Image (cartoon, helix red, strand yellow):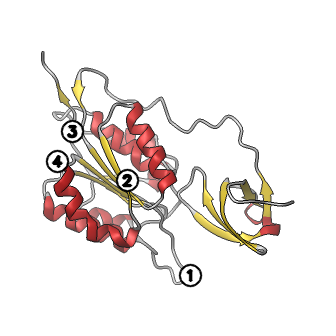
Amino acid sequence: MNFKVNDLVTRKSYNNDVVFKIVFISDRYVILQGVNIRLCADCFLDDLNPYELRDFNDVSYDLPIIKGNYLNGKILHLDSDIDYLKRSMKLYEHYKVPSVGYKINEKDMPNKIDDLLNKHHPDILVVTGHDAIDKKGHNVNSSFFVECVKKARIYQPCKDTLCIIAGACYSSFKDLIYEGSNISSSPGKVSINVLDPSKAAVMVATTPVNEYVDMEKIINITSNKSKGMGGIDTKGLARKIYS
């Protein structure tokens, strides 16, 4: 079969477990990007099966948010993947959560975070993109996420004033939490869904400021539950409007 860029495929060698989009083709070699999983991969063309998209709903419309007349928390979202960023911004828009997003490579995030925090003064910071574990057992991009979290905590040390959600697939959960994240991936060193960090951000942004976020509820709405996301006690950042 003649495959082309943007075709949806699965890999035979992995029992067709993940749906990918082809982002690059060179001779018999392809680079793939997960459609629903924050995962990049490569393989040979003869390992691919075509995939027909069926009943795909990109935005989750059933998050268990608290409804009412609230001013929701503002989100600053940094993502290394423009497609994933657009989908996250669509989620925020649906739930009427004010947000601003930037497509930034993981290695550049620590150098740009100070200017962006001072420019936007967010209530919630999401730092995500791609991560993996190399052949030596080391994380590929966790160090950049960790450094970004460190700098954000210098900007705002209080975890109840700035909620930080950080990490991607296979990221170093302990390092991210110990350096100042409220919610992070990935305790079980597994893949996470494209929208897992964004769903967590919506839950924090819409929970009243005088209540603690239901962390177990956040974990249960993510793709791999406690293996994929975890966190610490965190207050909501929505403020009730009295008029």
Residue 38 drawn at (x, y percent): 53, 57
| Measured Cα–Cα span from mark 3 to mark 4 | 8 Å
Residue 33 drawn at (x, y percent): 60, 60
Give the mark nearer the N terminus: 4 vs 1: 1
Give the mark nearer the N terminus: 4 vs 2: 4
| Measured Cα–Cα span from mark 3 to mark 1 | 40 Å
Task: For label 1, count other residues whose C-alpha is less than 10 Å away and answer few (under 14), some (14-19) or many (20+).
Answer: few
Residue 160 has which mark? 4
Farthest residue to the top: give it.
Answer: 243
The amino acid beneath tag 1 is: Lys
Query: Which element is circle 2 on?
Result: strand
From the viewer's side, name the closer residue of 200 and 48: 48
Circle 3 or circle 2, nearest the eye: 3
Circle 3 or circle 1, nearest the eye: 3
Give the mark nearer the N terminus: 3 vs 1: 1
Query: Which element is circle 1 on?
Result: loop
| Residue topped by disc 2 | 230
Residue 91 drawn at (x, y percent): 43, 38
The amino acid beneath tag 2 is: Gly
| Residue topped by disc 1 | 135
Give the mark nearer the N terminus: 3 vs 2: 2
In screen coordinates, is 33 left or right of 85? right
Circle 1 or circle 2, nearest the eye: 1
Q: Is residue 175 visible?
A: no
Farthest residue to the bottom: give it.
Answer: 136
| Measured Cα–Cα span from mark 4 to mark 1 | 38 Å
Give the mark nearer the N terminus: 3 vs 4: 4
Residue 241 to residue 134: above or below: above
Residue 237 has which mark? 3
